[in-house]
Image (cartoon, rainbow, N blue to C red):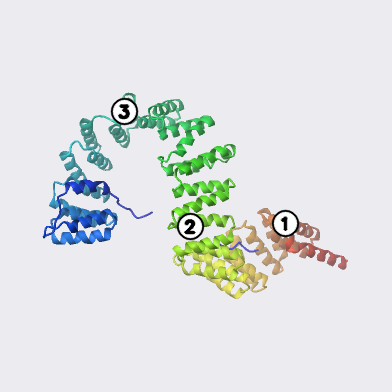
Amino acid sequence: MLSSPIITRSKKYLKLAVFPLLLLLSTTLPAQTDKSGNMVSYLEALNNFNLGNEQVAEKQFKEIVDKDKNNDAALFYLANINLNRNNIDKAQQYMVEALKIDPNNNWYKQQLAKIYTFTGKNEQAIALYNQLREEQPLKSESYDALIELYISEKNFIKADEVLQDIEKSVGVNEATALTRFNLLIFQQKQEEAYNYLEKFDQQYGTARTSTILGDNYAANQNDSLAQKYYSRALNLAPDYQPANFGLAEIYRIQGKYALYFEKMYPFMRDPNVDPSMKTGYMQQILTNRRFIQTFLPQIDSMMHNMYSAHSSDSSIAYSYSLFLVQSDKSGKALDILHNNLKLYPQSIEAHRQYLSLIYYLEMWEPLIKKANEALLQFPNNTDFLQFKGIGLLQTKKLDESIATFKEVLKHSKGDSTTMVNTLTTIADLSYEAGRSKEAYKYYQKTIKKEPNHFPALNNYAYYLALEGKNLKKAYRMSKITIEGEPNNPTYLDTFAWILHLMNKNIEAKAVFKHAMLYGGKESAAILDHYSHVLWELKEYDLAFLYWDQANKLDPELGIKAKVQEKKQLLESNH
């Protein structure tokens, strides 16, 4: 019997806060002039930078530096251009040069410290932040970064010293309290950390600190105290969604589902909540089939609220569309993915998701059309070529389908899985097109690349058996498949049929009996083959029984006429 045809992180990027500085820099940096006193070239370069014309701006700033080696502002912008391109070493070089020219410029120090932090040069970054701390004792931005660096270096004493300076400068507030809380957590002092936060919350409580305490009690299964702190947080800030979420989970665990959904609806509807948190949470909820069946309308509302809040977020669109498909709302799912594709026409994943759903819905003509549209933007993409090939196959355009899969093969070098599966597919389709020699050539190429590729071995063996050619070779190939997957009814059927053709019907019967235990009774073709073996063994009643079952499964196999012939033959022999 035939197997089914086999159709089957990114580079680190440093994005520092350049643009918030632009207005300040334009007012605090000295006006830059060339040797003739003309500011035009500098202003043009700055304007091009602000407009995003970085290539032009870079050329202009370089010309300025060539004329004036001490133009620190031009060096600063050259550094930022290189940051945007992830040319960190070059950016650092320009920032170092700019700071040498103007060693008192705190913007330069801050930017260079960030570069040092990103590249792991913590010692140099700490030195710069400490300079900033001494020169700007009331600015907490450098303090926060410095504490993070000390924590990463596990220098908790220094981190605590900096934190104490902040508390002396600005007093104790939510930010300082959470920094001290985190510092204690990093030191593995969890109990002390939560005790500290409890005292702070009693005196200066905020929605955030109360929620953190609620989360801790919830994690320790103290639902009453968790509920107390979540309620406290919501009294302070009724729309604080982390507290809403925490309280909702308490209600879900307690089985208070009306209250649970009452809290979850606004949580899912809030566009300020991280969409990835929502999708992650819903993926967990959707694994509980009983919960879904019981509360399908409410879950549908949650998913709808989530999508309404983030309709331009692809991950939300994919999650929602999958839920809709599982809820038998495939048409609506198609609209969601089509809208996502219109928003992101340059996204490979947006095309892939849309095509996958069209394929799932067996919309073959649209599949061909949309695959062609995707291929206009992403020529030679093997995924889109495969979608097109499947569509052509399903619309009976066999030669075009084979040609398309040959294109897949041409562009799948380096991807051994795609290459092997495509070779097998071309072989299967070539045989279906009546070109057995070409089919065998592609099966041989498949097996050469992957000697234990079971679908290719099975189909090649089966076709050889059908043609009565080289049964020994067919036997060897088929034996590999059942040794690899001994309970696969398709492979068992092929092996048993080859045994039958080799006049080994007793052995064939044993293999067919095994296939019956693992799904063989669900296949009309396997039942038909088994019946032939039983007939040869003169077990006529059993043969007719299985032929009758096969005919009920697939009346178009012509089994009824075959049985009549067999019965007439029996009568004539008697």
Kindly tell me whether residue 569 is visible in this rendering.
yes
x and y percent of residue 122 in the render?
23, 47
* Label placed on residue 196: 3
The residue singled out by tag 2 in the image is 351
How far apart are the two marked residues, 2 and 1, measured between alpha carbons? 38 Å
* Label placed on residue 144: none
Query: Is label 3 or label 2 in front?
Result: 2
- Comparing 326 with 504, the one in front is 326
Figure check: 164 above or below 486 = above
Disc on the earlier residue, 1 or 3? 3
Kindly tell me whether residue 88 is visible in this rendering.
no
Q: Quadrant of the C terminus?
A: bottom right
- Report which quarter residue 556 is drawn in: bottom right
- Comparing 451 with 145, the one in front is 145
Disc on the earlier residue, 2 or 1? 2
The residue type indicated by label 1 comes to Leu
